[in-house]
Image (cartoon, rainbow, N blue to C red):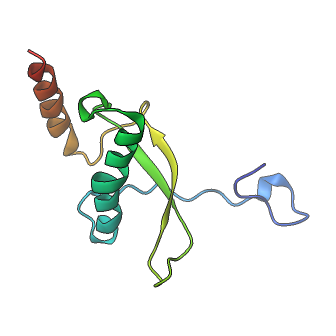
Amino acid sequence: MLVLPAPSGAPPSEAPQPGPRLYHSPAIPEFQDLKVRVEQTWVPEMQRLLDNRTERLPMLWDCDFLLGPKGESGEDTYVLCEINVSSIAPFPESAPPFIAEAVFRRLHADH
């Protein structure tokens, strides 16, 4: 099954190509509600359900979301598509020093 199939009766080579991957800064206003939900509700609830402390989470991971149906008052909703813990790159380009600092703190917290 193709994610973006060709028009009916057209050969597969005429399937539309996927658009570019979009990456956004964690400060983008349009996603602050989603960011707050992930950080303050969904991840803590997942940790509670899985009995997994913050110190045991990977240092670098991300979540991909799809838009869900509009909520009762017309707000966007989201559906978790996947959680990635390997083969991901830090973004934005300013992130690596903060990740390095977090790794350093975690390593030294155990001693």
Out of 56 and 22, give the one closest to the viewer: 56
- Percent from the top left, x then y, of residue 66? 53, 60
* Residue at (39% x, 44% y) in the render: 46
Picture residue at 50% right of the left edge, 77% below the top: 71
Q: Front-most of 17 and 101? A: 101
Q: Where's residue 21, x and y in %?
A: 47, 54
**Relative to residue 6, is residue 81 drawn left or right?**
left
Residue pictured at 32% horizontal, 30% vertical:
58
* The furthest residue to the top: 111
Residue lying at the far right of the rendered structure: 9
Residue 98, by quadrant, is: top left
Residue 23 percent location from the top left of the image: 38, 55
Q: Is residue 105 above or below residue 33?
A: above
Q: Is residue 96 above or below residue 70?
A: above
**x and y, in percent, of residue 33 in the image:** 32, 67
Number of callouts = 0
Q: In the image, is 93 to the left or to the right of 16?
A: left
Image quarter of the C terminus: top left
Q: Nearer the viewer, residue 32 or 28?
A: 32
103 on left or right of 79: left
Query: Which residue sits at x=26%, y=35%?
Result: 54
Dividing the picture into quarters, in which one does residue 16 lie? bottom right
